[in-house]
Image (spheres, rainbow, N blue to C red):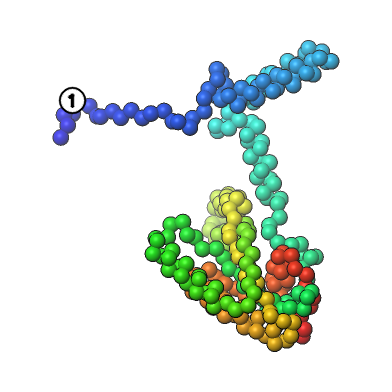
Amino acid sequence: MPDPAEGAPVVYLPERVDRRMRLGPFPSVRDALKFLCWAAAGAVLATWLPLGFWLPFPIVGFAVAVGRVDGESADERMVRWVRFRWIRLRPGVGVSPRAVPRVQGPIARRSDGRYLAAVRTDGVPLAYRPPDDLAGLFDRFRDVLRGVSGALVLRAYSVPVDAAPMLPRTADGAPSLAPARAGYTELVRVLCLRRRARRVDLFLLSENATAEGGRRVRERARALADGLATLAVGPTVLEGRALGAAVSAAGWNLTPPDP
């Protein structure tokens, strides 16, 4: 047991290797370049404007380069705010409602007459799975693909995470908790806007344009969904409007299927 008179051991930590290099009063070289850009812009204007118009430029440039609010400069906060607004205004993956063709049932018909069906699944998180689990998952997925007959087209993309299941109900809690509930709701929505989920659409095409080909492609879609259910990816056989939107997003032209 160490002697208390000697005091606690002291461990010296090295400086961070990723820290920004200061340049005089400026927090980093980039901030010094910001100041120089502001000063240069004022100098250019001073060539045909009175000298008094040049003075605010270096003052504002120095304030932008040196000033920090919660560790961020004014221009960095502005860029982050613009990105946040762009994410909120950016539409999700898909097609506009006017572009969605009318489709009835679980099959659609392409312009060339061949029938198709679609199965939609979510992604599978693989980052922290043990090697044996990954190997078993790969083997099951290989068996599912081998069991599919005919043409199969996969379309993988990402969509914003749906915040609705994680939002609190407005009727829950006392009225005094309304401000906290509103703040939590906004936080969840912002986080979901910045997160995206994997989605995969699997399209099955019929061998021909006959009614028998349409019946077979419907059966193949149901069998594929049953096989994917063993992988815990939540397969869904698309029907109606959802099927029309998925096929249009894939770039195919459709005609209404036979009744």
Residue farthest along the right direction in this orientation:
48
**Residue 6 location, x and y as percent?**
19, 25
x, y percent for residue 119: 62, 73
Q: Residue furthest top?
A: 51
Tell me the residue at 54%/57% (across/down).
174
Residue situated in front as seen by the camera: 252 or 9: 252
Dot 1 crowding, Cα within 10 Å, few <14, some 14–19, many 20+:
few
Rendered residue at 33%/28% (across/down): 12
**For this view, does 257 lie left or right of residue 30?**
right
Q: Quadrant of the N terminus?
A: top left
Q: Please give the residue where the numbered disc 1 appears in the rendered image.
A: 5
Quadrant housing residue 118 = bottom right
Is 77 drawn above or below residue 240 in the view shown? Answer: above
Q: Nearer the viewer, residue 6 or 234?
A: 234
Report the residue at 46% width, 56% height from top. Answer: 127
Instruction: Say if residue 170 shows up in the picture.
Output: no
Between residues 254 and 4, which one lies in front from this camera angle?
254
Dividing the picture into quadrants, the one containing residue 68 is top right
Residue at figure coordinates x 73%, y 86% from the top left? 211
Q: Quadrant of the C terminus?
A: bottom right
Q: Residue furthest bottom?
A: 212
